[in-house]
């Protein structure tokens, strides 16, 4: 038998200058604001006024950090963490079983419920703020963290359920049938099959819910009044009034507020991209 030898030919790929140019422009667009935020927050007010916003600081200082921490930043941070964790937990507890029921149920009620959730995507929160304010008052929840948590979860559920339902439809029906033959009930199938197979989508919607709760401004502004119930977004508004002249201190508060979000993205970016791409946990 004759053996054919195929020789590999080395080929030099041409660089994509167009894509590289766009990437460089995007790097500048993203990098300059981040550099500015860090640079401002680590210099004194006089240094900032003398050298301008883009110049390198002549000396680094942590006085801005001390000044921000002395302005109830820790209290705002604790409230924001409580709201964020509660929103993510409550959203997942409701959305995962709801998406599972929508995908697996053949009842018209499940289909109607899914349409109602989709209809919620078209309703902006600003259009419902007056009736929502009245409802919160009637429930005697005004000026509490619960008044922030419940509306945030409600307006985040439609998109979360839409993403989870699309992910659960990718799970093979044979796996459901196999567990049913083994005698597994709906709750066991949900816990042992649906949740492990949808970890990517669950992490994606969890990250989405966390970002939405962390950056929430409208509900805290309208539904709370007590300074002890303020979250970071309202705290930044307060800092804007406190530090009208001291821009470096204001930028330090912004950087401390954005830092947890940046860390969360670094940790969850793989699951976030995978879940939104519809590839589950693979």
Image (cartoon, grey):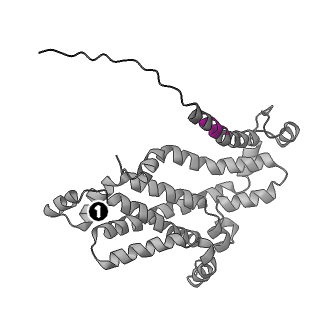
Q: How many marks?
A: 1
* Image quadrant containing the N terminus: top left
Decide if residue 65 is on the left or right side of residue 22.
Answer: right
Quadrant location of residue 101? bottom left
- By secondary structure, the bulk of the magenta-drawn segment is best described as helix
Residue for badge 1:
190
The residue located at (73%, 41%) in the rendering is: 36
Residue 142 visible? The answer is no
Q: Secondary structure at mark 1?
A: helix
Looking at the picture, how far across and down is residue 129, in whole percent? 62, 76
The residue located at (80%, 54%) in the rendering is: 243
Quadrant location of residue 25? top right
The residue located at (54%, 60%) in the rendering is: 84
Who is closer to the viewer here, 80 or 75? Answer: 80
Looking at the picture, how far across and down is residue 60, in whole percent? 76, 34
Residue 51 visible? The answer is yes
Q: Which residue, as the protein is rendered here, is positioned at the far left?
A: 1
Decide if residue 273 is on the left or right side of residue 280.
Answer: right
Looking at the picture, how far across and down is residue 48, in whole percent? 83, 40
Is 24 above or below relative to 180?
A: above
Range of magenta residues = 23-28
Decide if residue 241 is on the left or right side of residue 142.
Answer: right
Magenta segment: does it hold 240?
Answer: no
Looking at the picture, how far across and down is residue 166, in whole percent? 37, 60
Packing grade of label 1 (10 A; few <14, some 14-19, many >=20) is some
């Amino acid at each position: 038998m004759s053996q054919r030898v195929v020789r590999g030919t080395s080929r030099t790929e041409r660089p994509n200058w167009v894509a590289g140019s766009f990437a460089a422009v995007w790097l500048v667009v993203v990098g300059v604001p981040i550099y500015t935020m860090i640079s401002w927050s680590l210099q004194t007010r006089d240094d900032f006024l003398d050298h301008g916003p883009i110049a390198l600081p002549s000396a680094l200082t942590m006085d801005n950090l001390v000044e921000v921490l002395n302005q109830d930043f820790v209290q705002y941070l604790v409230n924001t963490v409580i709201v964020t964790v509660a929103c993510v937990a409550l959203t997942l507890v409701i959305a995962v079983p709801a998406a599972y029921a929508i995908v697996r149920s053949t009842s018209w009620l499940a289909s109607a419920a899914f349409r109602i959730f989709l209809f919620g995507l078209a309703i902006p929160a600003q259009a419902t703020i007056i009736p929502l304010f009245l409802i919160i008052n009637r429930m005697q929840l005004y000026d509490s963290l619960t008044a922030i948590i419940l509306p945030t979860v409600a307006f985040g559920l439609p998109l979360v359920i839409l993403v989870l339902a699309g992910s659960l439809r990718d799970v093979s029906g044979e796996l459901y049938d196999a567990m049913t033959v083994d005698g597994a009930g709906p709750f066991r199938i949900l816990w042992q099959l649906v949740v492990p197979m949808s970890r990517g989508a669950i992490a994606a919607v969890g990250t989405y819910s966390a970002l939405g709760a962390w950056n929430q401004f409208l509900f805290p502004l309208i539904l709370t009044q007590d300074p002890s119930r303020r979250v970071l977004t309202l705290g930044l508004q307060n800092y804007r009034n406190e530090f009208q002249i001291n821009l470096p201190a204001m930028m330090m508060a912004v950087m401390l507020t954005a830092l947890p979000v940046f860390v969360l993205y670094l940790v969850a970016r793989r699951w976030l991209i995978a879940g939104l791409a519809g590839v589950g946990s693979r």
